[in-house]
Amino acid sequence: MLGVSEDLPLLDDLMPWSVAPLRLGRGWVVAPDARTLRTRWDLLLRSEGAERERLFEPSRSRALSSSVAALPGRTGVTGALARERGACPDPVRVQYGPFDEQWLIPDQRLIDAARPELWRVADERQLFVVEQGYVPAGADDALTVSAVLPDGRSPAGRPGRIRPLYRRPGALEPNLAPGLPAFLSTAYGSVVTAPDVLAWAVAAARPGAAGYVVPLPRDPQLWAAGVELGRRLTALMTRGAREGGKPRLPGGRRPYVRAALPARPLELRYDAADEVLYVGEVGRISPVPPAAWEFQAGGVRVLAWWFQRRTEPAEPGTLAAVGPADWPQEWTSDLLELITVLALLGELRPQRAELTDAVTTPLTRGELRAAGVLPVPDAARRPASVLDHHEEGPGGQFALI
């Protein structure tokens, strides 16, 4: 396997604009289902005075009196929450940690650090690369990709970095080092696009002391093979949101519910011999490949972590403790899809290892410097500063950006 060298390019060299993770400040603003969020919002607004403040859980960044700008693309949510009487803003799908899609109330008054620069570029063509803040040895995925806005945190709670593929909505202005596509197109004898660079990074990047190392091969055929592998990985991680359609295992290997899940399952167990996932005392899903059960991210087993977040009791009397009375059918559908995604990703691990081993004489940062690709201009590390639409500032005033 290729050793990590100080002269190998970093993901920070190739995709220079990155954003810190979201900081929610209060856990009740996110939930595995949208109905729960609307219920929590209604409970908050039916409360008054000190009770509303207690339920809200104020922080140094946000209080009931806070007046802040609306998130990009949102209007009418800029007055102080102490006087709010309106309906809950429509929840949006987010990636709440690796491989866990949940729902978020898109209201900046509720979120300590919402990272508006990410919301400005989140659309149906955007992809977000997420660097895990903690990557133990032998981890299944150092980088993940999301088609929905990610919070950018690992299961261990450590912050990573979020790198959008594009700096502007509509897949405009790729988040790449200036000159990189032209340099790679010449090196490989074919047009290299931003999705190609992202795909290669997903397939080949490895954590290093200075950041995520992305060895770039000299062989055009190896590059093409790695890009194809990275596209398959990306399609799985994004659940077919951009291309490829919903992930599917072959007919005889698809997981099915063999025994109905109980209303309130309390444990998750796995029988490797029979490839059965037990959900509670009576619920059974099979076949569940060992690769899906063993799949880890951020040092934790993804399936067990996903289940724990939906069943672990919250502090009584808080909004976070408000949830469905019974296990919703949509959670079962999400679980079956997650099992499929993890199983298919696990099957591709040997190909990723082979790809890494095949890159024996990579391009160096010195060569990128000689070509004028590095160092990256400071402007490329900052978000695009001018967009073509208005945003609502505090108190309903238009904000200039």
Image (spheres, helix red, strand yellow):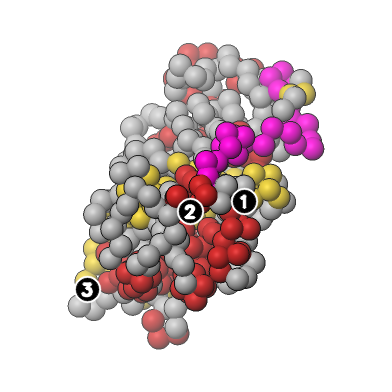
Against 256, residue 264 (above or below) is above
For marks 3 and 2, give the one nearer the viewer. Answer: 2
Secondary structure under tag 3 reads: loop
Q: What count of labels does the image hold? A: 3
Residue assigned mark 2: 367
Q: How far apart are marks 1 and 3 (CA)?
A: 50 Å
Horizontal side, residue 398 vs residue 97: left or right = right
User: Which dot marks residue 272?
Assistant: 3
Q: Where is residue 51 in the image (x, y as percent from the top left)?
A: 47, 18
Nearer-N-terminus badge (1/3)? 1
Q: Which amino acid does label 3 sit on?
A: Ala
**Secondary structure at numbered mark 1:** loop
Question: Which residue occupies 62% across, 51% down?
Answer: 179
Spatial separation of the CA atoms under disc 1 and disc 2: 13 Å
Q: What stretch is highlighted in magenta?
A: 373-396
Asked if the stretch drawn in magenta spans residue 386, the answer is: yes
The kind of residue on which mark 1 rests is: Gly
Please name the residue that numbered disc 1 is placed on. 179
Seen in the image, is 278 located left or right of residue 104?
left
The residue at 74%/33% (across/down) is 386
Where is the N terminus found, in terms of image quarters?
bottom left
Q: Is residue 103 visible?
A: no
| Along the viewing direction, whichever of 10 and 202 lies nearer the viewer | 10
- Please give the label number shown on residue 395: none
Seen from the viewer's position, the closer of residues 194 and 190 is: 190
- Residue mark closest to the camera, 1 vs 3: 1
Q: How crowded is mark 1: few (under 14 residues within 10 Å), some or many (20 or more)?
A: some
Find numbered disc 2 in the image and state the secondary structure of the residue it sits on: helix
